């Protein structure tokens, strides 16, 4: 039987270099985890359905008679149903300097309390200084239910019947 000369065993306790490698590995892992969590937060919607910035369920089509204007305060819009039964969601934010514009049912107009801009039931400007009609939000009717997407106000230069949505 052949025997080989033995050498002393390598040291088993971690060296300073091993310790630094481990430390860098842990730091890299934590950084990767934080980056992953930040990406997830960015990808997830920041608002819930039913809140301003999300999709608001307004209820059944038949709840809105022709010629009605219904406020949805949580969504910051009015749901108008015109005489021809078309739906239009109007952002309540004045296009002049952003004041909330109330609906005046007696006059059939939106009248801004800040500088007296007035808008008709389609959001068209009747009285300056508002520079353009009230912005609108996209309306969808799904299985007889009206939904308004408040994620993005849609600017327009004027009212157009193509903006109306029908059941
Ligand atoms: S903010 Fe509405 S008229 Fe000025």
Image (cartoon, rainbow, N blue to C red):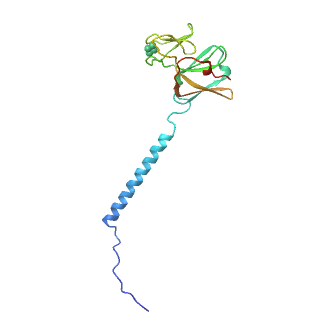
Foreground: 73 or 87? Answer: 87
Ligand 1 rendered quadrant = top left
Foreground: 132 or 70? Answer: 132
Residue 25, percent across and down? 39, 58
Is residue 162 left or right of 29 when viewed as pictured?
right
| Vertical relation: 105 (above or below) 14 | above
The quarter holding residue 141 reads top right
The quarter holding residue 147 reads top right
Taking the view exactly as shown, the residue that stands out farthest to the left is 16
Taking the view exactly as shown, the residue that stands out farthest to the bottom is 1
Residue 8, percent across and down? 33, 80
Residue 153, percent across and down? 52, 25
The quarter holding residue 142 reads top right
Taking the view exactly as shown, the residue that stands out farthest to the top is 107
Is residue 60 left or right of 51 when viewed as pictured?
right
Foreground: 126 or 14? Answer: 126
Residue 28, percent across and down? 39, 54
Quarter that holds the C terminus: top right
């Amino acid at each position: 039987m052949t025997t080989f000369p033995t050498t002393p065993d390598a040291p088993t306790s971690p060296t300073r270099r091993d310790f630094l490698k481990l430390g860098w590995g842990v730091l890299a892992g934590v950084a990767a985890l934080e980056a992953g969590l930040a990406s997830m937060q960015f990808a997830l919607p920041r608002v819930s359905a039913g809140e301003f910035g999300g999709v608001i369920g307004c209820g059944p089509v038949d709840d809105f008679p022709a010629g009605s204007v219904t406020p949805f305060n949580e969504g910051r819009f009015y749901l108008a149903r015109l005489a021809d039964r078309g739906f239009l969601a109007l952002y309540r934010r004045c296009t002049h300097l952003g004041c909330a514009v109330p609906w005046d049912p007696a006059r059939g107009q939106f009248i801004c309390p800040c500088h007296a801009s007035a808008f008709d039931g389609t959001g068209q400007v009747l009285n300056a200084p508002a520079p353009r009609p009230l912005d609108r939000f996209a309306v969808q009717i799904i299985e007889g239910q009206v939904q308004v997407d408040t994620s993005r106000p849609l600017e327009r230069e004027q009212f157009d019947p193509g903006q109306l949505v029908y059941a």
